[in-house]
Amino acid sequence: MAATELRRISAKAARFTESVIREMSRVCALHGGVNLAQGFPDFAAPLPMKQAACDAILGDVNQYAVTWGAPSLRRAIAERATAYNRVPTDAERNVTVCCGATEAMIASLMAVLDPGDEVIVFEPFYENYGPDCVLSGAVPRMVRLHAPDWTLDAEALRAAFGPRTRALILNTPHNPTGKVFSREELELIAGLAVAHDTLVVTDEIYEYILYDGAEHVSFASLPGMAERTITISGLSKTWSATGWRIGWCVAPEDLTLGIRRVHDFLTVGAPAPLQEAAARALGFGDEYFAELAADYRTRRDALLPVLEEVGFRTFRPRGAYYVMADISGLTDKNDVDFAMELVADGGVATVPGSSFFERPADGASLVRFCFSKRAETLQRAAEILRERFG
Ligand SMILES: Cc1ncc(COP(=O)(O)O)c(C=O)c1O
């Protein structure tokens, strides 16, 4: 069909483009590059979890699970949320299993927001939150985190709250910066959420990936906050299984009713045999989570010095598995041109910083590197970076 014959798409769909992060993965494959763009591991998922998935499939767990999640998985989520996150959780009343944290976020927003409601989002932000706001009809109000430590400006946050503020989206540990929100920062947010009767939707998908003694504080664990918080997590990052599409949210009972309703008609449910395997994975012992964080520290410490050595200015992540890097010491180009040049001819794929900001110019001197990769992959990336900038 010729371009002139393209038909109208909805006003909502016309307001955003395809994901820059996922686009960079495609460009990388085209150029035969090393993919440090999209946030997925290139190493194996844990064997007992894979074995449990095979067992479930061979055991004919092939039909729809309960729409809001298999009982075994909801029980495992409730136990973990209660013990690790310190958020007392009931599997029947508070848990909804979704197709990834991605669906958990959009189902949550669609369940609690009406057109015109305002949502506070910290910037830079994980790019899905922009389209999530559009799809749920909400108006995002950005509050900037300031480099180099991505500090939160209390005054700017206070000023962002108003009569239409219905929710705040939090993400800790934070993609793309690696910031881990401190207890004091979370208490500031909690005070404002109470004062303005605001919900908090917190994406804690990197909750176990922490460095240098950083502590993960679940927002819902702060006094009185569980009643106004939707906590989102999933299998993708902690269990290295982004393709399984298992995520969940923990929310008060009244909000859970709304979330389950939206979820039911969006996707019906997450893959049934993989939910059984996820239940097994959530029961892994403490040593699994300690080893995961230690392995990620090794990966971070392999990439970070190389970036510094070749001329990037980096922000040392305290959680998650990304590094934001300032390119201004290396080039006069903007982030997109720089990233395209770096991936070309078997180079290294990154994500242009502009995709994490409302106004592209604000991220024009940044690119994001992902280090959830095998030592060999990071080594290969280091060789390419040294060849090009050394
Ligand atoms: C902050 C954040 N939330 C959610 C997701 C997506 O999670 P899932 O694979 O469970 O949909 C990602 C993936 O990169 C992420 O960085």
Image: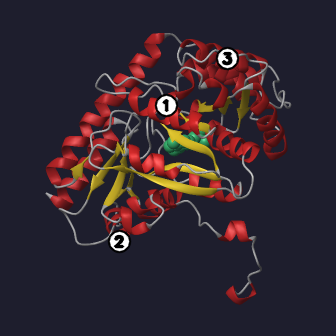
Q: CA distance from mark 2 to mark 1?
A: 33 Å
The amino acid on which the numbered mark 1 sits, given as a three-letter code, is Ala
- Closer to the observer: label 2 or label 3? 3
Residue underneath mark 2: 337
Is the residue marked by circle 3 packed among few (<14), some (14-19), or many (20+) residues within 10 Å? many
**Of pointers 2 and 1, the one earlier in the residue sequence:** 1
Q: Which residue is mark 1?
A: 44
Task: Report if residue 182 is visible in the image.
Answer: no
Q: Nearer the viewer, residue 169 or 305?
A: 169
State the quadrant of the C terminus: bottom left
In terms of depth relative to the viewer, which is nearer, 205 or 171?
A: 171
Q: Amino acid at mark 2?
A: Asp
Q: Is residue 90 left or right of residue 155?
A: right
Measure the alpha-carbon separation of dots 3 and 1: 31 Å
Q: Quadrant of the N terminus?
A: bottom right
Which type of secondary structure does the marked residue at label 2 adopt?
helix
The residue singled out by tag 3 in the image is: 89
Report the number of numbered marks.
3
> Residue 29: horizontal and vertical position, in percent?
47, 58
Badge 2 or badge 3: first in the primary sequence: 3
Q: Give the label, 2 or 1, closer to the camera.
A: 2
> Which quadrant of the picture is home to ligand 1?
top right
| Among numbered discs 3 and 1, the one appearing first in the sequence | 1
- What residue sits 28% from the left and 52% below the top? 325
Q: Which mark is residue 96?
A: none
Residue for point 74% across, 35% down = 270
User: Residue 322: x percent and y percent?
Assistant: 38, 43
